[in-house]
Amino acid sequence: MDTDTTYPTIEDYDEIGKIFDKALDEYVSTNNVNTLEVISSSSEKRSNLASAMIHSLSLLIDSSTRLAFSKFISFDIEEGSLGQFIQATVDAFFDNDLLQTVRTFLENSKGSFGLCVATSIEAHRQVCIAAKGQTNSVAFYPRKGVICYGSEQAAVKAGLNYDTPQGTSKYKNESYGADEDAVRLDLDDLGGEICLLDWGYGSDSEPAVSPPNRHLSVDKLMGGGVNVVLFHLSIAGSTPLKTISQRLVVMENNEFIKPLLNDCDDPVLADIRDIPRICSNIQEDWKVRLCV
């Protein structure tokens, strides 16, 4: 950041935001728009809204705010940068939901990340789990009404150990079925992947996803109660090689996945005491395989 450059203040952005808000209200009222989705899904209406905002901004912005932005934007309409700024702002308003924001961050970031991201606007219905250069797994427990996530596969087994009497699962009996068993999804940390979990709100059971990501497939887990949308950074725009059902690892009734051990006061001492047993198990396993 250039320390010699004076950047606009929060008050300057608030001033522009109020003008944008007024222009949007006027556009909605003048054009009999019932919902913002009508504008969001139409590039023509977005452009019309941007044009209306250019006119409002050029007339209503005060001199101090104009000066604060003058190093970055020319308010000369014919020059063109004001129109680009407003069009980008309009697109960001309609497109930058939770999934698109996490996508933009990961596509432009450097380093390794294992993220869980939520926003106060959509916290009542969705969350994003993401992996890039760091492992991240999500476990679904339909019968218990629980979803666990963590950067260690073993961590998401926590749901195997505990009953959840307050769970909201639709499964009320002890019968077992393939669709009811807990499953684990390991995100692609090598190529980078985002997992949006959306459990809906009220009567709206479909995921809330903005236009740039509406082409992505939607899978339903947790007995159909949770929408799962996956975005792969490395193959953006392409069809994934595997469906989500092919990637899920069954965690219950699986001989290769054991529940977590019980808590103890001294984990280090417990690990030391486990060494003979583990070595013996390894030896026995080799003997069985050699006999086969």
Image (cartoon, grey):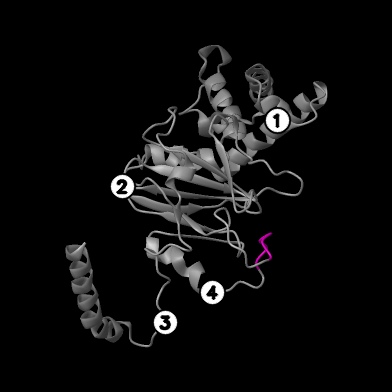
**Earlier residue among tags 4 and 1:** 1
**Earlier residue among tags 4 and 3:** 4
Q: Nearer the viewer, mark 2 or mark 3?
A: 3
Please say if 147 is above or below 203: below
Quarter of the image for residue 56 reads top right
Number of other residues with Cα within 10 Å of mark 1, as a class: few under 14, some 14 to 19, many 20 or more: few
- Are the residues at dot 2 and dot 3 in contact (C-beta closer than 8 Å)? no
- Name the kind of residue labelled 3 in the image: Asp
Q: What residue is at 43 percent from the left and 41 percent from the top? A: 105
* 173 in magenta: no
Quarter of the image for residue 174 reads bottom right
Distance in Å between CA atoms under marks 2 and 1: 35 Å
**Earlier residue among tags 1 and 3:** 1
Secondary structure of the residue carrying tag 3 is loop
Q: Is residue 124 left or right of residue 5?
A: right
- Are the residues at dot 4 and dot 1 in contact (C-beta closer than 8 Å)? no
Residue at the disc numbered 1 = 37
Please say if 56 is above or below 12: above
Residue interval drawn in magenta? 167-172
Give whichever of 111, 219 is nearer the camera: 219
User: Which numbered tag is attached to residue 46?
Assistant: none
Q: Nearer the viewer, mark 4 or mark 3?
A: 4
**Earlier residue among tags 2 and 3:** 2
Residue at the disc numbered 4 = 162
- Name the kind of residue labelled 1 in the image: Glu
Distance in Å between CA atoms under marks 4 and 3: 12 Å
Number of other residues with Cα within 10 Å of mark 2, as a class: few under 14, some 14 to 19, many 20 or more: few
User: Which numbered tag is attached to residue 111?
Assistant: 2
Residue at the disc numbered 3 = 263
Number of other residues with Cα within 10 Å of mark 4, as a class: few under 14, some 14 to 19, many 20 or more: few
Q: On the rendered image, what quadrant is the N terminus found in?
A: top left
